[in-house]
Image (tube, rainbow, N blue to C red):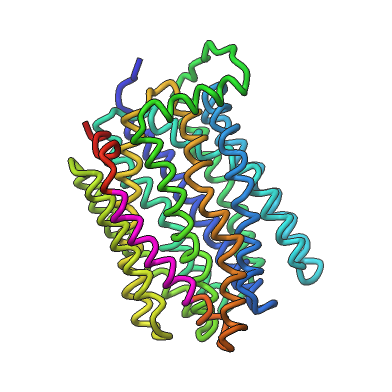
């Protein structure tokens, strides 16, 4: 039975995730700059990002099963606490001298393995705490926390890197993990964890999650299209930094990323305050098409003002798209199956990121070599092509009647 709203408890939990996102953003920014300055390769930057992301993707489905079988808050605490181990390893390597690329890859991989416990448990906990009427508003708040790594972290990291080095960023991130655990523990004390009467095996749980997803054709279509969309967006996310670093400093990069991410903050605040009431499919398609157009403008020239303006537009559109996807899927899945379903949804919809992280950097380096241009312009070429394809997919998505039916 759905319990009454616990919006204040949600805010405590959300605060912890906000802190964690800022810390993770510091590490991501710092390691990206560190690797690019040492190697000058977009592919090496992409490799670190891929290894930080891959465990979360592969383990998302098992983590979703765990979220339905065990205490979700306890899983979140374990994921946050133990993910600090990988960062401690990287920090130790740097304190002993310069960290090699393979050492950084090992560290981010270890951290990501434990972090994979978080997403399904966090999403399912949001469902536990809130009423259906609060989902859209909460999604806006979740988008704000998610945008923190792009909004606050680059500016903070860029300023700190001007006076210190990446080791300070790692230390700060490690400290944020423990603050997040405290917030989650506070919420856990006030919630009685239900003991699910489930005796099915992991494979049976996976099968249940898959059956839940494919019950409605529109949900399955959304997930498949999401995988394609994340591929194009992943190219933008992985190549924006080398594109800018090729002609600007890390401080300017941090400021620019923060300005761009302000778009996500503005739209998240709008959604959090007002929510979206109807026409979720139409808003989804329009926001994705506009994001694709913004990617094209973002990569046109080595002009930091132009990059900032189109980057702002790109991030402004993301919360609208994420909110609509979240609502359309969440309201069409039973609450007691949310953990398993979200685990599989995260896996399937984010496969595109693996493709992008595995190929975008290589394509950018290759384009730079073939065309005899800088790595930054090679990255810009890949971003522009991805933007065109994203806009095309967004227009095609609206043609599916099964997706539009999900609103009913």
Q: Magenta stretch containing residue 391, yes or no?
A: yes
Question: Which percent across, then down, holds residue 339?
Answer: 48, 29
Q: Is residue 218 above or below residue 28?
A: above
Q: Nearer the viewer, residue 85 or 222?
A: 222
Q: Nearer the viewer, residue 103 or 47?
A: 47
Could you tell me which residue is drawn at 65 percent across and 62 percent down? 47
Q: Residue furthest bottom?
A: 372
Q: Is residue 29 above or below residue 197?
A: below
Could you tell me which residue is drawn at 44 percent across and 31 percent down? 124
Q: Magenta stretch containing residue 381, yes or no?
A: yes
Question: Which percent across, then down, holds residue 160?
Answer: 55, 72
Q: Name the magenta segment's main secondary structure.
A: helix
Could you tell me which residue is drawn at 70 percent across and 48 percent down? 110
* Quarter of the view holding residue 242: bottom right
Question: Which percent across, then down, holds residue 296?
Answer: 36, 73
Could you tell me which residue is drawn at 49 percent across and 53 percent down? 21
Question: Which percent across, then down, holds residue 343?
Answer: 51, 35
- Magenta segment range? 380-397
Quadrant (top left/top right/bottom left/bottom right) for the C terminus: top left
């Amino acid at each position: 039975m759905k319990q009454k709203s616990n919006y204040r408890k949600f805010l405590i939990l959300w605060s912890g995730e906000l802190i964690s996102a800022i810390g993770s953003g510091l590490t991501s920014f710092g390691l990206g700059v560190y690797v690019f300055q040492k190697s000058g390769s977009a592919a090496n930057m992409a490799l670190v990002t891929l290894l930080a992301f891959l465990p979360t993707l592969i383990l998302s489905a098992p983590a979703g099963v765990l979220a339905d079988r065990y205490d979700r808050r306890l899983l979140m605490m374990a994921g946050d606490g133990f993910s600090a181990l990988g960062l401690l390893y990287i920090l130790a390597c740097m304190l002993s001298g310069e960290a090699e690329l393979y050492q950084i890859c090992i560290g981010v991989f270890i951290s990501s393995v434990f972090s994979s416990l978080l997403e399904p448990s966090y999403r399912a906990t949001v469902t536990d705490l809130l009423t259906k009427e609060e989902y859209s508003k909460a999604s806006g708040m979740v988008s704000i926390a998610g945008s923190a790594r792009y909004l606050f972290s680059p500016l903070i990291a860029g300023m700190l890197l001007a006076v210190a080095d990446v080791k300070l960023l790692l230390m700060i991130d490690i400290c944020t993990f423990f603050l997040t655990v405290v917030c989650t523990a506070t919420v856990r004390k006030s919630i009685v964890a239900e003991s699910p009467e489930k005796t099915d095996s992991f494979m049976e749980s996976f099968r249940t999650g898959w059956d839940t997803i494919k019950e409605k054709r529109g949900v399955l279509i959304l997930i498949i299209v999401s995988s394609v969309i994340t591929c194009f967006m992943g190219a933008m996310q992985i190549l924006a930094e080398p594109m800018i670093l090729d002609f600007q400093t890390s401080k300017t990069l941090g400021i620019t990323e923060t300005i761009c991410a302000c778009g996500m903050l503005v739209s998240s605040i709008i959604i959090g305050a007002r929510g979206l009431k109807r026409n979720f499919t139409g808003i989804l398609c329009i926001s994705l098409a506009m994001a694709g157009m913004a990617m094209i403008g973002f990569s046109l020239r080595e002009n930091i003002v132009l990059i900032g303006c189109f980057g702002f537009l790109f991030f402004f559109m993301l919360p609208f798209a994420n909110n609509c996807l979240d609502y359309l899927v969440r309201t069409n899945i039973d609450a007691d199956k949310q953990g398993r379903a979200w685990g599989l949804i995260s896996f399937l919809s984010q496969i595109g990121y693996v493709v992008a992280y595995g190929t975008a950097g290589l394509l950018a380096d290759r384009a730079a070599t073939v065309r005899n241009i800088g790595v930054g312009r090679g990255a810009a070429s890949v971003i522009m092509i991805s933007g065109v394809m994203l806009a095309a997919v967004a227009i095609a998505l609206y043609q599916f009647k099964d997706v539009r039916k999900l609103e009913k």
